Image (cartoon, grey):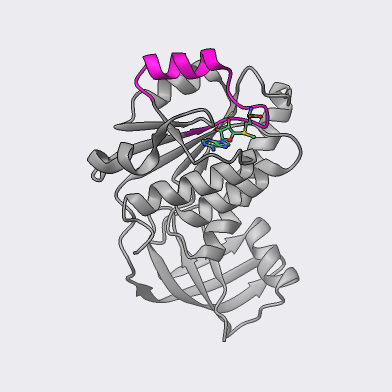
């Protein structure tokens, strides 16, 4: 029987826990769960428990923690995806797939060819939406930690943050360097930054600036991939090369 898994925003430290708000609503009204049902709860530290519903009120679910679940270690390399904000709802897909694969942070960025314009309020609500996508993708995929979705930043700010990584990969369709060779010396990198452009790609001057600041400019082959394809493939290949997709 499928045991439903939920990410909770607080640490699981007491035997009895009250779930409220959207989570309680989802359990009671959407999933129609009831007293006696068992669920899995995972907290922000990645600690996971089997729990049993022991009581319900209007939009409150009382659970009792039954037993902790010890599972595979959290991947040691911290991977950040810097993504040129695409049009439409493609960012939802990129956030969902990058989360399933194991990215720990996603930074949406405005580059010269980003078509999307977002007011501060719109950027805030988009970030909150993408963060909800990340929570449900983490619950579904069995991930331990929900990736942080940052507020959209200008390219310059993304450059400054990415430059602090141990390995910074900017994916560029005109690049010559194959990914595998570039990654070979970085198998034990602590922090890897992946940078992918929007539909229109990066300006050559943006690529040159990133290279000057330490980025490795890498190719995904001769085909021109859509931004959402490139982001998903780049994350998957980098995590695979880091040996993090086997665990
Ligand atoms: N401006 C490009 C063109 O029309 O030739 C297309 C950009 S592509 C749709 C969007 C992003 O995906 C690029 O900025 C790059 O980051 C990534 N990308 C697509 N194909 C790639 C490839 N073969 N190698 C490396 N990156 C690629």
Q: Position of residue 98 (x, y in %)?
A: 53, 49
Q: Quadrant of ligand 1?
A: top right
Nearer to us in this view, 245 or 160:
245
Nearer to us in this view, 127 or 80:
80
* Residue at position x 32%, y 66% in the image: 72
- Residue sticking out furthest to the front: 222
Q: Position of residue 224 (x, y in %)?
A: 61, 38
Name which quarter of the figure residue 163 lies in. Answer: top left
- Is-magenta flag for residue 214? yes
6 up-or-down from 101: above or below:
below
* Residue at position x 46%, y 70% in the image: 16
* Residue at position x 70%, y 73% in the image: 31
Asked if residue 129 shows in the view, the reply is no
Nearer to us in this view, 85 or 180:
180
Q: Position of residue 2 (x, y in %)?
A: 57, 81
* Residue at position x 50%, y 41% in the image: 221
Task: Name the image quarter holding the N terminus.
Answer: bottom right
Task: Name the image quarter holding the C terminus.
Answer: bottom left
65 up-or-down from 35: above or below:
above
Q: How many marks?
A: 0
Name the side, left or right, on which 108 lies relative to 178: right
- Is-magenta flag for residue 198? yes
152 up-or-down from 225: above or below:
above
Name which quarter of the figure residue 151 lies in. Answer: top right
Q: Which residues are magenta?
A: 195-215
């Amino acid at each position: 029987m499928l045991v439903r898994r939920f990410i909770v925003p607080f640490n699981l430290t007491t035997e009895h826990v009250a779930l409220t708000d959207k989570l309680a609503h989802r359990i009671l009204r959407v999933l129609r769960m009831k007293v006696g049902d068992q669920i899995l709860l995972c907290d922000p530290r990645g600690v996971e428990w089997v729990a049993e519903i022991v009581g319900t009120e209007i939009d409150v679910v009382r659970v009792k923690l039954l037993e902790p679940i010890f599972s595979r270690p959290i991947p040691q390399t911290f991977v950040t995806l810097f993504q040129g904000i695409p049009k439409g709802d493609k960012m939802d897909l990129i956030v969902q797939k990058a989360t399933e694969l194991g990215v720990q942070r996603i930074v949406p960025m405005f580059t010269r060819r980003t078509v999307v314009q977002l007011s501060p309020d719109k950027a805030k609500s988009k970030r909150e939406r993408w963060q909800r996508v990340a929570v449900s993708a983490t619950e579904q995929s069995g991930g331990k930690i929900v990736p942080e979705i940052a507020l959209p930043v200008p390219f310059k700010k993304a450059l400054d943050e990415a430059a602090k990584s141990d390995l910074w990969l900017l994916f560029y369709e005109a690049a010559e360097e194959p990914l595998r060779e570039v990654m070979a010396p970085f198998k034990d990198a602590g922090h890897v930054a992946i940078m992918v452009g929007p539909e229109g790609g990066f300006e050559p001057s943006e690529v040159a600036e990133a290279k000057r600041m330490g980025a490795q400019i890498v190719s995904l082959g001769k085909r021109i991939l859509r931004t959402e394809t490139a982001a998903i493939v780049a994350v998957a290949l980098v995590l695979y090369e880091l040996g993090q997709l086997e665990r």
